[in-house]
Every structure is written in structure tokens, then in C-alpha cells.
Amino acid sequence: MDEFEKSPVSLGEDTGMDESDTVENPKTSQKSSSDSDSSDSEDDADQKEQLLTLEYELSTNPSNYDAHVQYIKLLRRSGEIEKLREARENMSTLFPLSPEMWMDWAKDEASLSNDSNCESVQKLYERGISEYLSIPLWCQYLNYVQEHDPKVRDCSADGISKARNLFERAVTAAALHVSQGSLIWDAYTQFEKAILLTIDQSDIQAKEKQVQRIRSIFLRYLSIPLANLKSTLLAYKAWEVQQGNSLDAESDNDLGISSNVASAYQKAEEMYNVRAHLEEQITRQDVSESERFQHYMSYLDFEKSFGDPARVQILYERAITDFPVSSDIWLQYTRYLDKTLKAGNVVKDVYYRATRSCPWVGELWVRYLLCLERGLATEKEISDAFEKSLKCTFSTLEEYLDLFLTRVDGLRRRILSASGDDVLNYSMIRDSFQQAADYLSPHMKNTDGLLRLHAYWAHLELKLGKDLNAARGVWESLIKSCGSMLEAWKSYIAMENELDHINEVRAIYKRCYSKRFSGTGSEDICHSWLRFEREFGTLEDLDHADKKVTPRLEELQLFRLQQESKCFTRATDHRELTLKNTAREKRKSGSSAIDDQSPAKQQKYNSQNKKLHEKENTQGLNLAEVKDGEEKKGKAEEQVNEKQMKNTNPTKSRVYTDQCTAFVSNMSITQAKDEDLRQFFSDVGGVSAIRILLDKFTGKSRGLAYVDFEDEEHLAAAVAKNKQMLLGKKLSIARSNPKQRKRESFSRTAPGDDASSQGGRHGSSVSKESGENSQGSRASRVPQSTGRKLDDNFELKGKNTFAVPRNVKALGWTANKSGTRTEEDEKPKSNDEFRKMFMKS
């Protein structure tokens, strides 16, 4: 058992103690010891409970990133090394760890191992620097190698070579980091200075070679735009002085260095000055994440304008370190590398990291597969990446489809090119298609994506697999699950038609022409069959297809008319409901406006409203009396009309209820006959009777007719033909509603609306002026009822004397001797009496 497992001290804690800490009062010490023991036991119990909770959470949901982080923190605090190592390994297989987590892990392992086991710690550092760019992690790695690697620490040739290679890798990865890159360069120069001190003074050649090496590092350092260029220049000048070189005597500039170094330094300083404000924006801590993200985007555009791929790449690495789960940055980064580097281990490594950081982005996986194919990766490597992608959760099914198609594309290209050591055959493509169909079909029924998959599959079965039956099987499996998809049938037909399989095409048409497709698809497939038979079939085939298709087209037309009628009815009902609601809202707003009036205006409105209700009640009594007479007359007229109908159409003497009857108006009076109407409604069908209304005096058509239908469906289709032309007249067709006609007839013959008709029925004598419907004075000018007294001195008589003026003496009137009128004088003279009077005179 190692020393860490013997001690309960947490990792990373400082266990140092002063002597004053041990000098305590024995009683106080005993009391504090008991209190600390109780608090520690409570903390341990809480910690164990939290660990059990997190373990259960991770067992049920291993993709919970935060649970992994909390679990590792608790294990590190409790000092359970084996569980901690296992937890870190489990998390690293699912997620990329942050640089801080890699630093803690390496630090913990370094504290538990000796120098002979430093290789395992170095492997952890290697894994850490491959995830994200982190200058602190690189510096910690370099320091660990210099301190714990025996070869490097002893300055052996192999150790120095190993350290220099590691420093060069660090320079390549992070030296262009504007704000922190100087840390790598400083560590590098310090290492080489330490090597210089180990060289024997007598070995002049080796010492001069090392000095030149350090000078070269300084020159590289000063030519890069970094944040601490001025301090670096001062350090370089001081070092040159230590070497006994007088720079001022050799320089021809204000910097006091050689011209070539001064030129590189001034150029680097200018580059840094134009980037200083951009660096400040992305390193500030008082800005939001979204603002920092936008600053990175602006900085990247700036670097791209200079066309230096190395500087653009290092800035992308800094961006993904700050925003590791931003798919936008990863997508931009990989696109840029595809455009500039095309292929190579660098691009492949970035794609690998991108899919680990954002595994839910299908586009990254698709382009990762293309990158592997472009880099001539093995089939096993590509297959492993594809299988990993299928375990991820994407936001759309189209991403899964694109992934499957990309996999098939790669297999097809590699089979056709026959390149590589892997042996590929068509069965791998068929298995990939089958896997895609099983995976996507339950979720993508009747979609273009599923059609695209099966069309590609059938094409490859035919062209690459050379198996016609397999291609037909692909289409059959699609129409079995998506039989209502018109394009699936058309694509199946197109394949057979390209192969000149006429009988197979005809068989498919016979299977699908009677199916119902969305929109006008049913009509399209029927017309397509007829066109096919005209172009490829015999006359008998065309007649047979026409015999099958024509009834189907008529059925579809009727169904469409019915649907249009229903839609029209629904639209009308909706419009009427909207109007009613609008009127109701207006009444509500009117009543609310009255409520807002002053009390005096409200009292005046209430009194006017009361008088109006009394007047309406009086009119209601009068209308009730008139209604009785109207009902009696209506029954009599209905009997007369029924007799007329029987006499006009003796063969149609049944009783019509108007339940399935259409009322047709605006017909041609002279030309329209029963046969014309029956022909007009022939496309609708279902006509059971036609009744054209005739004038009772002339016997000629009145331009009106009732058409009875067998059911509601035929009636609705007939009403849908409203406003269509017949014999040069635009017909008006509506559903017959006798109850509504009675209400309209009653409203037209109400008292005061048609005085002549009322006078003819009841013998009333009302002037034409009194029959006008004026809103303001109708109540004062029109009698409310023809059967009641207008006042105490006037009553309508049964005889029509409306033409006699009331205030003018009748012609030929003479008064008697007493000067009073008699009943005989009051009687008007007839024409014969007037003629006799004139003859006598």
C-alpha cells in the first residue's frame, strides 16, 4: 500500500504545522478534539451520502457532465485514489477534460510516484495537451520533465535531446500565443542557459555552439509579436553583454542591436501594436461570454485578412479553449483547415477533438468521415468513427440520413477505385442501407429523405450490385410502408421504364391508379397511365386503361366538388359568425358607452328605451293578429300550388319535403326545359325530379325551378355549381328552405309594407302614402292593424272606396232642403247616373 492510501490527507492540501499549533491547554485540547471528531464524522457521513447519490446518477445517466465533475471533486477530497483514477478514466472516455482537470490529475499522480515511474505521468500530460491549448499546462509539463526525468535532470545527451524536442513542440503549439506565448520562450531560453553552464570552460567549440543556439532562440523570440517584447529585448541585450559582446559599437540604430535583429524586432512590434486592442478585448474579464465570442470572431476575421494560417490556427485554438462546446467555432475551424490544409494528421486530429467536444452536431461527424477517407484511413478506423457517430443524439433525423449516405458514398468510391489494402465488397453497402432503413423508416414515413435513401439504394443494387430483383425488392419495401406516397410509385415506374419493362410498368399502374394520394396525385397517376399507354401500349391497352381510369376520374371530380362545397359552407358559416360577434361587440361597446354617461343622460335614455319597448309590444300584438290570417292564406295557397304542380307534372305527384331540393332561379324563360336542367346536372348525378314553375295565367315558365336530389352529397355538389352558365344565363342555385321563404313572405306582407295586398284581403282603404316605410314617422302614419279602429270616428269598410276624396264633394251632389246629408246623398254616382243627369240637363 502506497503512502497516500495510508494517510487520510486530501490531495492538494498543505499539511505543514507550526510549533505553536501543538502548544495547547490539555482541557481545551481535549474538548476541541471531541468537537472536531464529531464534526468530522458528520462531514464524512454527508460526503459518503453524496458519493452514493452521484454513483447512482452516473450509473443511470453516464452522460451527465456535471455529475462527473462533482464526483471527481468529492473523491479527490476524500483521498480514494483507485476510485478517483477510475472516475477520471471513465469521464475522459466520454468527454474531453479541461486543462485544469488534466493539471490536477497529473499533479496528483506525480505526488504518488517516484522519478522511475515518471513515464506514466508524462503520458497524462501528453493526453492533456492534445485536448486543448493551455500555456499553463505546457509549462507544468516542461517543468515536470526537467525536474523528474532522470535523463533530462542529469543533462545526458539523450535527456537534452528529449527536452529540446519537447520545447520545440511547445513552441510550435503555443509560441504564437500573443498574451502568454512569452512563457514558453522564457522557459526555453532558461533551459538552454542552464545547459551552457554545464559545459566545460575548456571546451570552447561546444560552448560557442551553445551560445549561438541561445542567440538563435532569442532572435526567433524577438521576431514574434508578443506582449512582453520590450522586456525580452532588454533580457537579450543583457545576455549579450554577459557574453562579452558590445552591441552599441556594432549597432547602427537606436535599439543598440544589430540591424537584422532590429528589423525583425520593429516588424514584430508593429504587428503587436495593431493587435493590442483585439487582445485586450478577448482577455478582459468584465465582458459577457457573448461579447467575448464576438470579439473572437472579429479577431479571426482580422487574422484571416493577413493570410497567415499558423496565426489563424493558434487563434482558433485559443477560441475553442474558451468556448469548448461552441459548435459554430468548431465548424468554422474545420472548414478553414479543409480549405487550407486539405488533409493530414493536423486536420484529422482537429476533427477528432471536435466530435468529442460537440458530439451532437451531425455535420462534424459527416466531415470527419470525409477527412478520414481523404487521408486514406483504414476501413477499421472509418468504421469505428461511423459506429461512434450512431451512438450520438442529433437534433434532426436528416442528420442521421446524411451520415448514412456519407458512409455509403465512401464505400462506393473505395469499391470503384479499388485502392487500399482493405478488401471491400458490395455486401457492405447493402448492410449499410439496410441498417439505415431499419433505423430511419419508423421515424421518416412518407418523407423525401426516405425516398432519397431507397432511390439511391435501388440504383446501386442495379448498377453496382447487378441485381434487378434486389432493386425491385427495395421499391416494394418502400411502398409497403409508404403506399400513399405518390413519388415512391413514380420512381418505381421510372426505373422499370428505363429498363424497357413495359409489362412491369403496366402492372404497377394497375396497382396504384385506384389509390388515394394527396392533392391532385390521384388524378396525376391516372393521366400518367393514359399517357404511358398512348406512347408505349397498343390500342387495346389504351382502351383498357381508359375504361379503368374514366370512372375513377369522375369519382375524384365529384369528391372534389363535395369538398369544395363543404369548404364554402364552412367559410360562409365562419363569416356569419364573425359578423354576429362583431355586432355583439358593438352592442356591448354601445352599452358600456351609455354606462359611462352622466346620470341625467342615462335617465333620458332609459325613458326613451321604455317607450320604444311599449311600442314594440303593441306592434307585436298587431302582428300576431295578422299572422293568423297569413297562416290561413298560406295553407290555401299551398293547396293551389300543389294542384298546379300535379297538373303541370302529372307523373310526379309525390309530396316534396325540400329536404334534398335545390332552388334554381334566373333561368331562360323561353328556352329552359326539364331536359336542359337534367343535362346541366348530369355531372353531379342523383337527380330524382325537376319542377319548373309556370305562370298561372299564361302557362309559361317563370324562370324558376325546384330540383330534387337523392341525398345530401348530390345536393351539395349541385349547389357548388352556383353562378354557372345555362343557355346564356348565369344560374343562381341554392338549397331550398321553405321555412325561410315563409318568414320572408311574412316580413314582406307585414302591416304598412304592402297596403294594397292588405286592402285586397281585408277590404281596408289605405292610401299609397301610408304604405311607405319611413323610420321616423311610420308609427304615426300607418295603421297598426287593418282589423281595428284607427280612432273613435273612423272604421274601414268592407267595400273598396279608396279613390273617393274625403274632403271633396262628389260630382252631382246636391243638398236637401234641410241642408243636411242623407244616406242617399252620401252614395257616389255611377257612370250611367252621371250620363242620365247630363242628358236631362
Image: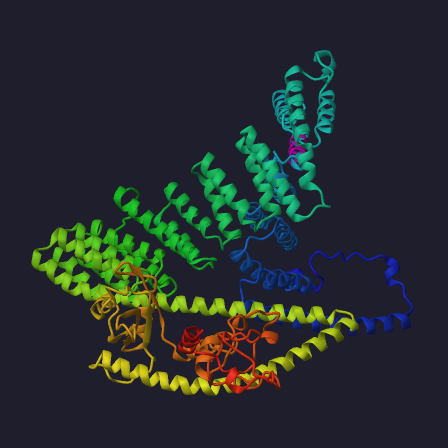
Q: Nearer the viewer, residue 29 or 267?
A: 267
In the image, taking residue 378 as reference, residue 467 lies left or right, namely left
Inspect the magenta stretch and tell me whether residue 185 lies in it: yes
Residue sitting at 34 percent across and 79 percent down? 658
Relative to 106, does residue 663 appear above or below in the rendering? below
Q: Is residue 161 visible?
A: no
In the image, taking residue 736 as reference, residue 66 lies left or right, namely right
In percent of width and height, residue 201 lies at: 68, 24
Magenta-tinted stretch: 183-194
Relative to 167, does residue 148 appear above or below in the rendering? below
Q: Nearer the viewer, residue 153 or 253?
A: 253
Q: Nearer the viewer, residue 128 or 827?
A: 827
Coloring applied to the structure: rainbow
In percent of width and height, residue 155 lies at: 62, 35
In percent of width and height, residue 751 lies at: 52, 78
The C terminus sits in image quarter = bottom left
Q: Is residue 620 visible?
A: yes
Residue sitting at 39 percent across and 50 percent down? 381
Dividing the picture into quadrants, the one containing residue 668 is bottom left
Q: Nearer the viewer, residue 615 or 765?
A: 765
In the image, taking residue 605 as reference, residue 110 lies left or right, namely left
Relative to 460, does residue 805 appear above or below in the rendering? below
Outermost residue to the front = 841
In percent of width and height, residue 320 lies at: 58, 45
In the image, taking residue 147 as reference, residue 485 lies left or right, namely left
Residue sitting at 62 percent across and 22 percent down? 212
Inspect the magenta stretch and tell me whether residue 818 lies in it: no
Q: Name the chief secondary structure element in magenta.
A: helix
The N terminus sits in image quarter = bottom right
Q: How many marks?
A: 0
